[in-house]
Every structure is written in structure tokens, then in C-alpha cells.
Image (tube, grey):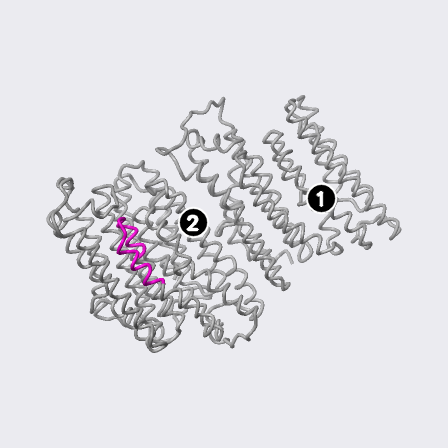
Amino acid sequence: MNPLIFTTILMTVLLGTMIVMMSSHWLMIWIGFEMNLLAIIPILMKKYNPRTMEASTKYFLTQATASMLLMMAIIINLMHSGQWTITKVFNPTASIIMTSALAMKLGLTPFHFWVPEVTQGISLTSGLILLTWQKLAPMSILYQISPSINLNILLTMAVLSILVGGWGGLNQTQLRKIMAYSSIAHMGWMTAVLVYSPTLTMLNMLIYIMMTLTMFMLFIQSSSTTTLSLSHTWNKTPLTTTLILITLLSMGGLPPLSGFMPKWMIIQELTKNSSIILPTLMAIMALLNLYFYMRLTYSTSLTMFPSTNNMKMKWQFETKQITLLPPLIVMSSLLLPLTPMLSILD
Amino acid sequence: MLKIIIPTIMLMPLTWLSKKNMIWINTTTYSLLISLISLSLLNQPSNNSLNFSLMFFSDPLSAPLLVLTTWLLPLMLMASQHHLSKEPLIRKKLYITMLTMLQTFLIMTFTATELISFYILFEATLVPTLIIITRWGNQTERLNAGLYFLFYTLMGSLPLLVALISIQNLTGSLNFLLIQYWNQALPDSWSNIFLWLACMMAFMVKMPLYGLHLWLPKAHVEAPIAGSMVLAAILLKLGGYGMLRITTMLNPQTSFMAYPFLMLSLWGMIMTSSICLRQTDLKSLIAYSSVSHMALVIVAVLIQTPWSYMGATALMIAHGLTSSMLFCLANSNYERTHSRTMILARGLQTLLPLMAAWWLLASLTNLALPPSINLIGELFVVMSSFSWSNITIILMGANITITALYSLYMLITTQRGKYTHHINNIKPSFTRENALMALHMTPLLLLSLNPKIILGFTY
């Protein structure tokens, strides 16, 4: 794509999200969402083939439906409160419709069906933008309306998302689908604590974005989109295998890596609010996620030459240099000792 | 405490910056020095704990376990030299780094004051162990073994996290030193029963309890020698240590909640001892014997009498040294014949007489011969369980008999009789191996002269 056009489109995506995050008028938020959606379609379709077209179409349809539902919730809110300001949504109908619309945008169960298929159809870089940047805007709206969200619906969606994210990823070998299911599960964790402490949602979002960025960049560096091709990285850059191991274990939420921090904080917040069975269930279902991360680590880093691996040399034009990778890796694995610093967020 | 932790962490730069011919020498020497530092902790002047800071303390229970941990690192390094000799230098350094990381986490776990910190480090010990088992094990089954190990332990310990946080909400602090004095009886309710279960299941899986022990034979058999040593000697004792710490908070539910686990342990120790009699795989036999000994520790901890606590602590230390030594002996067999099958390498006494002496000593301590500390531990446990209920003496007596049976079976099969004809060209024992066995045996024998230091905090 022409670099100037690509920059313009990318800036529009950024501008759309910025507008959503910084507006105080509901109409501007809807405009921001639409700007974001329309601008990201060309990015999703950078490579022009039927699979990408299918993925972009699915993305467009679901997101447009969600935007329309959001618009309806805004209008109902306008009808009942008479103003367009972003505050908590007082009318329960509007609140439920808005929550469902934002859940559709985020990919929470039962609106999660588009996430694996869209992520699979697009390139790794576009998938990266889809799973990290696109989550910021809906999450910021959820943050702002969090005092008025119906707890039952939100918690049901969260728990079901964690379950679906864990279970659905078990049968996958395509890396992008694995990342998609991991995103569904993490969104579930984030929304579960939204009503109790939105700060922890933001913390989880931050650490999730760091870890997902790291994972995608490691995949991009080895240009691998399947488990099989990922298992060939020992051949090209053996250090990457160790980094993939550390980052995957961090995503699975194992101490002493930083992926444990959001889970620990969320369990702590939920327990303080006297729900004990819920965090136990959530933590145990996160083990499903850990299982397919472990499977990835087994084929990539923990079984190396000489072993029963298909040892094909991979053709590669030149070594991609990803400058942001080392600091990201450090941040996504070593942040746990900084947990006491979270008290500055209060 | 930093005088132990910082040198252990610095062992990692030591391995990465050492030259090729110096890595083993450097790491073994410095880890021996660190273990000498930790010996000073055994001087516990009073019944109260030695408090080093807000975050680290050591008391008569954790000091012997800490000394065992630091003592074991040079032994693990010595044992691993042979099977890593053909690997490239970077992988040797990675292996030693994993062992050192595991050591650091273990030291911090045994000295942690805050229970959440204990939990995080308890979980953190899983990652290096998993990497050691899965990456450096020898057979394909090691993948399954790693998964079983990780998921059994995690399933048990996630409820523990929730329970610890809810206890922190109720009592305001999880600092162990404070909780000892704040202890009140837990009111009787269903949710407190689940709290009891949540607290204990993590350690039950780790011990392991008989019904949840499936991960242990897999993990022990598939791990390389250092992995087996650290698993048998220390990681199982983490479960015992955790149980001893957390049962102080869980009265009076323990009096009736403990019954199912007591039954499982009492029956399980006989079952696993009997399975040992039918094992063909040498490492598997030692693994099941670990389950059997740990079942005794579970019985002791759940009975909660002063004598049983003494027996549990002594048994943990004694079993750590004995089991680790047995795994080293099994590994010396494995390195020569590349098979773990017992009957393939028989009559070793004729070929390797000095190693046969070590085999004899190890088997004798395994079956708890007087006056070794194994006997002291088992005797205290048997006596206290007899006072708890007279009928247990039948099961305990049967267990001691069967333990003697399989230990002698293992000894006689591998050492006595005519040697198998295909092993007449095995290499003689290395000095390194003899040193390894001597370093295991010497503390064991010396401790029988003054067992007071391993008898724990109820002495």
C-alpha cells in the first residue's frame, strides 16, 4: 500500500479510538467507533485474497451491529435522561443494551464467535492491532459506565468467556486462533472485576496488551502462523524459544511472572467483596488456557534437537529487527515484584 | 537471610561468566560454601523463632529444611556432571541456572513470613522444576509427566490462594509470626469446612496424599537426576512444611476434617509399599517408597500432637537425605546400563563393591534401622498414632514390615547373586559418585548423634 495512504488510514484508526476515549458527548463516541471501524477495514485487508475479504466482512458486520445497538442504547438514554453527557446510564434497558453492544465489540461470550475467524483470516500485524488496540475503546466506555452495569449479566458473560476462551483454544494449532481464544478469556477476566474495581480492569488490560504484543512480535519475527512452523524457531533463533516459553508461561498466569499479577489482584478484589466461589472457578478455568500454552511451549522450546521434531530448515529472507521486543519481554515477565506499587493507583 | 539469598542469586552470573572447564568447579564450590553459611541457622536459641527481618524468619522447623536445601545444591551439581557432559556449553549453563533459580525460590519459601509471599514462591518453584523435567528428561513420557506435575499442583493450590486472601480479609494480616498469637478457634460452619479444604488440598497434592499421588511416579521417573533429587528431597517437604504452618490456624475443624485424609494416608502407605514389591523399574520403586514415607508424615501432621510433630520433622529430613541418595544410586546404575529395569543389572556387589556398601547403607536407612534418624521419625509417628488410636498400630506395623521387605528386595536384586553377563564391562565407580554418596550419608549418620536439631519446634 502507498505509505502515505497507509499512514492516513492508521492515523484515522488512532484518531477514532482517541475520540472515543476523550469525548463527553455520546454522539461523538459513536462517531469515534464508526471512524475506527471504517478505517481498520483496509488495514485488515492489506493482503487482497478471499480469506481476508471474508474476515473483514465478518468484522464489519459484527462491529456495525454493535455500533447500531450502542446507538439505540444512547437514544434510549437520551429519552429517559434528556442529555447526551457520558455518565452512568440510569435506565436499566439502556444499560443492558449498551453492555451487550460493548460485549459484542470486545468479543465476550456469547458474542465471541467472530474473534477466532476474523483473527485467523488476517495477517499477523493486523491481528496484533485487532486484538490489542481495538479493545481499548470499548473498554474505556465500559469503564465510564461501570457504576450502572447490571452485575448479573456482566458476571455471566465474564465467566462464560473465560470458559469458552479456555475450552475453545484446546483444539487449535493455528497460532492466531490460539491468540484469539486467549483474548476472549482475558476479556472475561477484565470484565469480571469491572464493577468492583475498574482500576484492576485497566491494570489487566495493560498487562494483557504487553503480553499479547510480545507474543505477536515473537510470531512476526519467526513469521510463523502455525504450531508446526513455530517449532522450527530453534533452528533460526534459539534464544527466541526461551523467550516464547517465558511469555507463554506469563500469559498462563504462573508466578513469579508478571502475568500472575492481574489474576492475583482480581482474585483479591473479588474475595474482598465476599464472592469466594467465583474467583476459585475463574482461576481453575484459567488452567485450561495454561494447557494449550504448555502445548505450544512443548513443541517450541522444551523439546529441542535431538528430538522427534520435523527438522526442516526454514527459508527466510533477512532477519527482521523488532526494536520494541526486548523491553516488552522484560516488562511482560518481570513486573511481579512491583505489585506493592499498585497502591499508587488508589 | 540475605547472606544466603544474594550469594545464591549470584550463582547465576557465576555460571554464565565461567569458562568451559570451570563451570562445575565454580558452582559446586560456591554452593558448598553457601550451605556452610546456612548451617549457622541451626543454632535456634529459644522456642521462639529467629526473626531476621519483616520478611524472613527461621524457626526450628524451617532451619533444618533450609540446611537440607542448601546442602542439596552442590550434590545435585555433582550428580548432573555425567549426563550433561555431552551437551553444548550453553545448555549446561541453562541447566545450572534452572537449578539455581529453583534453589533461590526454595530458600525464600522456607523463610517467608507473609503467607502470600510463601504461596507465590511455592508456585514459583514449579516453573524451573517443570523445565528441568520436560527439557532434560530422557523418555517421551516426560511430556506427560510435566503436565501431570504442573496441573495437579496448580489445581490444588489455586483454592489455597483464594483461602489465603479471605483469611487476610478476616484477620487483617497474613504475617505468620503475628497469626501464631492471634489464633482463635474457627467457628463451625460449612464455609469454614471449605476453607479448611482449600487450605489443605494444595499441600495434600504436594505431599502427595495417596489418592492424588499420580503425578509423583511420573515426575520422579522421568526427571533427570538433579530433578529427581530435588523433587524427592525438598519439593515434597514443601507440602509438609506448608501443612505444619497452616494447621495452626485451622483448629478445631481439624479434629473431624482430618479423618478422610488420615484414612487415605494410613491405607495408602500400605498400598504404595506393596506396589513397591512388584516394581520392575528402579526409580519407580523409589518414587512409590517416597509416597509411602510421606503418607506417614501426613498422618503425623494431621494428628497434631507434640510427639507427632517431632516425628514429622525428623522423618522429612531423614527421608530427604535417604531418598535423594537412593536416586543417586539408581542413577549410577542408569548411567552404566541406560536402563532403569532392576533385573538387568544384578550382582553389582561383585563388580562395584564400594558402591554396594553405599547401597547397603541407603537401604538400611530406608527401612528405618536404629539408630538412624529415619527410625526416630518413624518411631515417634508410630507411637503418637498409637496414642491417637490403638488400631493404627496394625497398619503401621504392617507398613514397617513391607518397607523392610521392599528395601531388602531392592538391595538383594541389584547387589547380590550372580552378576548378569552383559554388565561385565561397566566403568568402575567414579570418585565423584563415591563422594556424592558419602556426602549424603555423613549428615544422616551424624544427625543420629544429635537428633535434637531436626526435631522441630515442639522439642
Label number found at residue A138: 1
Circle 2: element type? helix
Residue beneath the point at 67% across and 28% down? A54
**Left or right relative to A161: residue B9:** left
Height in image: A121 above or below B419? above
Given the image, what chain letter belongs to the residue carrying mark 1?
A
Q: Is residue B16 in the magenta section? A: no
Circle 1: element type? helix
| Residue to which mark 2 is pinned | B148
Height in image: A208 above or below B439? above
Q: Nearer the viewer, residue B201 or B408?
A: B408
Q: Give percent across and percent down for residue B166.
A: 56, 65
Q: Give percent across and percent down for residue A344.
A: 62, 57
On whether disc 2 and disc 1 are found on a single subunit, the reply is no
* Residue B243 visible (yes or no): yes
Q: Nearer the viewer, mark 2 or mark 1?
A: 2
Magenta-drawn segment: B268-288
Graded by Cα atoms within 10 Å as few (under 14), some (14 to 19) or many (20 or more), the crowding at tag 2 reads some
Given the image, what chain letter belongs to the residue carrying mark 2?
B
Q: Nearer the viewer, residue B28 or B298?
A: B298
> Separation of disc 2 and disc 1 at Cα?
39 Å
Disc 1 residue type (three-letter): Pro
